Structures are given as C-alpha cells and as structure tokens.
Image: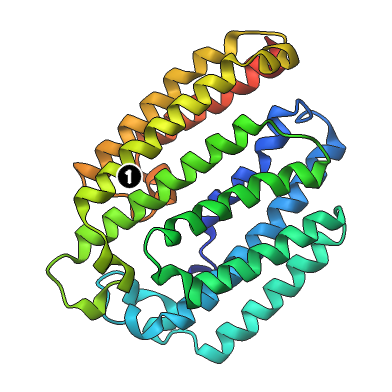
Amino acid sequence: MLPLIRLLRPLQWLKNGFVFTPLIFSRHMLEKEYNNKATLAFVAFCLVSSAIYILNDIVDAEADKLHPVKRKRPIASGEISVATGIGIAIILLSTSLLISQQLPLLFTGIIITYIFLQLFYSFKLKHVVILDVFIIALGFMLRVVSGAVAIDVVISNWIIITTLFVSLFLAVSKRRSELVMVQGTNIETKRKVLDYYSVQFLDYALIISATGMAISYSLYTMAERTISVFGTEHLIFTIVFVLFGIFRYLYLVINKGQGENPTSILVKDAPMGINLLLWTFSVIFIIYFS
C-alpha cells in the first residue's frame, strides 16, 4: 500500500485547500450546506490532481530515473507498473467527474478544463519558458474559482489577483529550487525548460510576485467593499502574517535551497506552519466573530 499512497501524493492535496478560500471569505463557513459543497469540490480536485500526478510520473519516468530525488517515485523505481498507474488514473478521473455531477454544471466544466490544461502542461507547455509557471498559477486560480462556483458565491477580484501572485510566487520558487539542485549535473537529469532560466532571473521574478502578493492582499483588506461586507477594518492586521510568510519562504528558498516542494515546507518548517495557522485563525475570528 505504501507505494500506492506515495503514487497518489496525498501531501500535495494541501494545495487544494485553495478551494475553501471562497467559503471562508463569503461568511458561509459555519453553514452545513455550504461546507458540504465545498468539501465535495475539495475531494474532486484531490482525486483529479492525483490522477494528473500519476500521468505526469508516467510521462517523466525515464527522466525521473536520473534525478537524485524523483528516481524514488513508484513509477520511476518500478514499484508500480505503467499499466497499473494508467488504470488508477482513469479510476480517479472518473470518480472525480462523478462527484462533480453533484455540484453546478460550471464546476464540472472547470474540472474538465483543469484536466486538459494539466495534460497540455505535461506533454508540451512545461517545456515553454515563463508560460510553464503561469500554467501552474492558473491551476491554483481554477481551484479558487471552482470553490466559488461550487457554493454559488461571488468572490472578490482582489482575492483572485492575490491568488495569482501567490501561485506565481510558489511556481517561481519551485523552478529556482529545481535549477539550483541540478546545476552542474547532466542535462538529462533536469527539466528542459530549466536551460532557459537563470537564478538571477528567477530571483527577480520572486521579488515581483512577492511584492504583488503583499500589495494585492493589503489593498483587499483595506478595500471599501471588504470593510462593508465584513463590517470591520480589522482584517488589515492579518497583513503581518502574510509578510512574515513571504520573508520566511524567501529565506528558505534562497538561503536554505528549499522550495521545490511547497507543501513539504508547510508541513516540515514549524515557523511557516504556525504562521499559516495564526493567519487562518485570525482571519476566521475577524470575519465571523469580530
């Protein structure tokens, strides 16, 4: 069972937590009906994302065998056969689409769009410089939009813009960490797109995306509509957690060489995990109980 669990990459399901963003900021988190719909959306995305990871592992199997870390993946190591992987992926995709039938039709459309987008990414777009990180970012944005569609609420444009910068920040840091890890190694052990990147360029991109993230979230907390909807100006105090998170993540990426696996940082780095929990609890308290 252990190779199967590793094949599904359940740790990566944390990324699908973006689906719950509209639930929290729409002030419906304490209502059972909305929670049920958001949970269904989360499960659907977990299943489809695991299926895409499996297909991606199959496509990259030969290259992964030469990678110092990825060679331990079940497909690359031979613990699970390609045929078995394809069968599991089909089951996961089918189940995800069945679950999506219980939500608005537009949600099913987003799931299908996400599937095709990730397939194009796996076979072609991940080799296109700059576009590759924007495709990753679009995947995060689709999660947020799908969360809003699932519970039938309108989400602030500022939330979407902030999500864009957050996802670009994570995608760029991932590319930077991959580039630093494989510098000086055989070209076959790394993504082809890394040939077109440099650490200096990615550092500039990190600064731009981090700045955009901080500014867009700050403007959201101070927006007239935000204050009107929540009936409080106190959301502005949560900016301190966002800034700490940005600085801590930059420190881990640049000084510690981490960033290739964002979810691993949240789980293994105590300051990042505690900071995320504090931000979440403070947002919930201000929105619902302030």
Residue 124 horizontal side relative to residue 72, left or right: right
* Amino acid type, callout 1: Ala
Q: Is 247 left, or right, of 124 in this rendering?
A: left
> Under tag 1, what secondary structure?
helix
x, y percent for residue 147: 72, 45
Q: Quadrant of the N terminus?
A: bottom right
User: Residue at point 41% right, 52% down?
Assistant: 171
* Depicted 206 relative to depicted 213: above or below: below
In x, y percent, where is residue 122? Answer: 49, 73
Tell me if 249 is positioned left or right of 237 in this view.
left
Whole-percent x and y of residue 86?
60, 85
**Residue 35: percent from left, percent from top:** 79, 39
Q: Nearer the viewer, residue 229 or 259?
A: 229
Which of 216 and 85 lies nearest the eye of the viewer? 216
- 268 or 236: nearer the viewer: 236
Q: Residue at x 67, y 18 (%)?
A: 226
Residue at image x 38%, y 35%?
Answer: 210
Looking at the rendering, which quadrant does residue 29 occupy? top right
The residue labelled by disc 1 is: 205
